Amino acid sequence: MSCISRRDELTFKANTQRGRYGWLRLTPAFSALAVEIALERAGARQRAIDPFAGTGTSGLVCAEHSIPCDLAEINPFLSWLCQVKTRNYTPSDILEARLLAHTAVQKTLQGVPDWSRWVPPIHNIERWWTPRRQKVLASLLASLWKEQNAKAQARDLVLIAFCRVAIEWSSAAFNHQSLSFKTPSVSLFEEDENTVILEHFLKEVEEILSSAETPVGAPIRVFETDSRFIDQAVPEKYDLVITSPPYPNRISYVRELRPYMYWLGYLRKAGDAGDLDWRAIGGTWGIATSRLEDWQPDNPSADTPVLRSIVQRIANKSPLLANYVRRYFHDLATHLNRITNILQPDAKVFYIVGNAKFYDTIVPTEQLLKQQMQDVGYRHVTIEPLRKRNSKKELYEYLISADWH
């Protein structure tokens, strides 16, 4: 597949300059164009669902095409982000958000809030932000939360801007699969840097409010739930699925979202991230990794011959990683079985997935998923290479499409 290019227009990079789509980045997220490709092939549809919603891209695109869409997401921060991004805002919401932002900036400059208790308990936080930056960010956040009469719609918009500023002024670098930190530039005068950060915050607020003024088309609902048991959480039947589950590559969503989740209180202690990752498909952050050592499948007979062969080859180098791959596909099989309970007889499904490589063993996610879908009863399962990924040369992204009978 040497002719397949990287096609950045199908990744999160294409969303960054597209209004609501680019409010917060998530590197594994797909672009609006990827959803539009699926919609074009799906034909006329009545109701869609994305069971691995991420940042809500599927919902926004479906709404633009007048298709009601439900979003399911296990991560509480991403669930909140989906709700904020897909909500319709009134002129009074926009005005109140702007006033809240300016009031918070004034109080921060005056030193009114007690900022110290708002600094999040991130391990080794000095790698992320200098003490000066911690103080101004914590003061700003305290000011935002202490305006108790502010409506949730207004505050949520402003908190998106806060997240953008917090990550922009951090020393974190997300340009590689492993998180790294760069040396922060240092201002000689604390007051000068504080002012620049707060001005940056107000600029981000205006950018977000400008895109929030454009209404969302069709209704979008968000469910915070485990998509392995999606049929227990949603009240509808769907004739369209467009989604991208996590890939079996040990790259956790929590890794990239941790700073936001700590600042906004979704994570309060170190073990919280690992607990969340253990419940998510493909998660291996913190304690989730150690739990893999004792994991046993509920239904060992669900292993296909191909999966058993792949797991055994990986186990020769790392039994832990072998268990990781095995658990990933068992969880995915559970999801594929349960989602059929909420599909209309003529439903069309689209899954964007990526393969993986552990040592010298390729994990052909697309082929394994195709077999799982056929075993459940999906028809006309097809695999289409979408793009070359930016890491190892053997790694690609695929669009899998199928019909439910």
Image: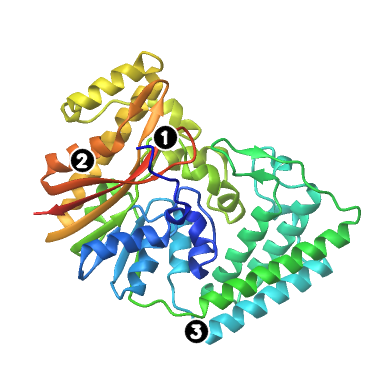
Is the Cβ of the residue at disc 1 closer than 8 Å to that at disc 3?
Answer: no
The structure residue drawn at horizontal position 81% and vertical position 52%, both measured from the top left corner, is 132
Q: Secondary structure at mark 2?
A: helix
Q: Which residue is mark 3?
A: 90
Residue type, mark 2 in image: Lys
Q: Residue 246, image x and y in percent?
A: 38, 43
Residue type, mark 1 in image: Asn
Q: Secondary structure at mark 3?
A: loop
Give the mark, 3 or 2, whose residue is nearer the N terminus.
Answer: 3
Query: Please, is residue 209 above or below residue 355 in the view?
Result: below
**323 or 154: which is nearer to us?**
323
Q: Which mark is residue 249?
A: 1
Q: Which mark is residue 370?
A: 2
Callout 3 crowding tier (Cα within 10 Å): few <14, some 14–19, many ≥20: some
> Which of labels 1 and 2 is toward the front?
2
Q: Is residue 163 left or right of residue 291?
A: right
